[in-house]
Amino acid sequence: MNRVILTSSSGVGLIHADRADMVVPLIFRFVSGPLPSVEHLNRYLGGRSLRIFEEVIWSDCVRRLPFVRREDRDGALLWFCETYGVDLIELWFDPEPNSQLQLIWILDYLRSQPFVAPRLSLRCVDFDLRGVDPAELRHRDVREFDIAESDFEIASMAWEAYRAATPELCSGLLNRPLGKLSSLKTAMEDLLAELPSPATGLGATETRLLELIASGHDRTDELFRPGVLGTRVFDPWELGALLEGLAFAPTPAVAGLDGQLATLDPDNARSRNAAFRRSRLSLTEFGRAVIAGREDFRRHNPIKRWWGGTLLTNERLWRWDRESRSLVAP
């Protein structure tokens, strides 16, 4: 085995693009909910022998290969690469924010592994990997860079910033040169825009949801379609949670979302999808006042939501002013 690709879930098409002997899609979502612990992330990469609980590991999402022994798939990722003689590990992470967070996480992890550095290569993926035809990926010319110690340092600094208990360090990244990790700057600005606005109390995606509903997009299948919102932080499952927060708050901004969603088990995907499809959405009077800037959603409704390592609450509500590109402290 000569070449392995590490990528995000956006890059699953690389599995069929014949650019490597093995493609490893990393599955974590870092843009919503509490971040996984360092121990959990290390167990994911460390193989089944290190697992305390029954958890998914890196190889569970890898296509079975005829020359790989079944028991070796349970080993640590880097042990596997060394055992099977991997000469090159390519990093394919597109500009989408969650993919960029995965890139800095994996670089931070690999920094302390002496086996890896000489074999590591960064592909400058300046396009969206999701949805690209594998035949196109097979022949597409993508610039390639070696990873220097300075790149590891930037990744570790950025990952530490995102895991911090306040978003201040992440805000500071916007004014720093990030070298080969230049896509991270735009991704971080997209993430910061999801903090509540000083004017409306809503993040960028929540605001776009209200604006589209106001313009007549009353069906969730329209709102959740890729590219419709013009924001790229959240996937459809996460968009559903944001919409529920707008509709089921004590002072709702959205009417018409099926009430069963408030009581359905989060893992009951079939029933939840049906309830979303049944919904016919509109803005409440309060919702119209919010997008007009006359009301602040967070002055009327509670918040308890994670942004990286920052827990946002009404008492500790960091906001982001998009016009001045600056944080507003609680």
Image: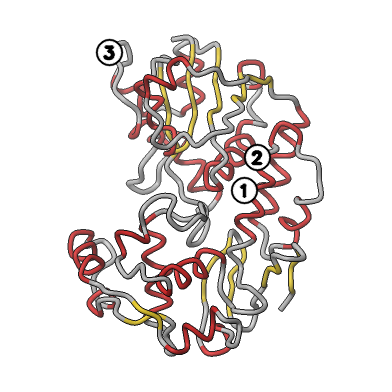
Position of residue 218 relative to residue 158, above or below, is below
Disc 3 + disc 2, Cβ < 8 Å: no
Residue 71 placement, left or right of 84: left
Q: Which mark is residue 187?
A: 1
Q: Kindly identify which residue carries mark 3.
A: 66
* Sequence-first disc among 3 and 1: 3
Work out how far the residue at label 2 is from the one at label 1, CA to CA, in angstroms.
6 Å
Q: Which mark is residue 278?
A: none
Query: Is 195 in front, or is 205?
Result: 205
Residue 181 placement, left or right of 303: right
Q: Which mark is residue 183?
A: 2
Image position, residue 74 (x, y; %): 36, 29
Q: Amino acid at mark 1?
A: Ala
Q: Nearer the viewer, mark 3 or mark 1?
A: 1
Disc 2 + disc 1, Cβ < 8 Å: yes
Q: Residues within 10 Å of mark 3 (few under 14, many from 20)?
A: few
Residue sitting at x 37%, y 27%? 133
Residue sitting at x 68%, y 68%? 320
* Sequence-first disc among 3 and 2: 3
Q: Quadrant of residue 199?
A: bottom right
Work out how far the residue at label 3 is from the one at label 1, CA to CA, in angstroms.
38 Å
Position of residue 161 relative to residue 318, above or below, is above
Image position, residue 277 (x, y; %): 22, 65
**The N terminus sits in image quarter:** top left
Image position, residue 248 (x, y; %): 37, 82
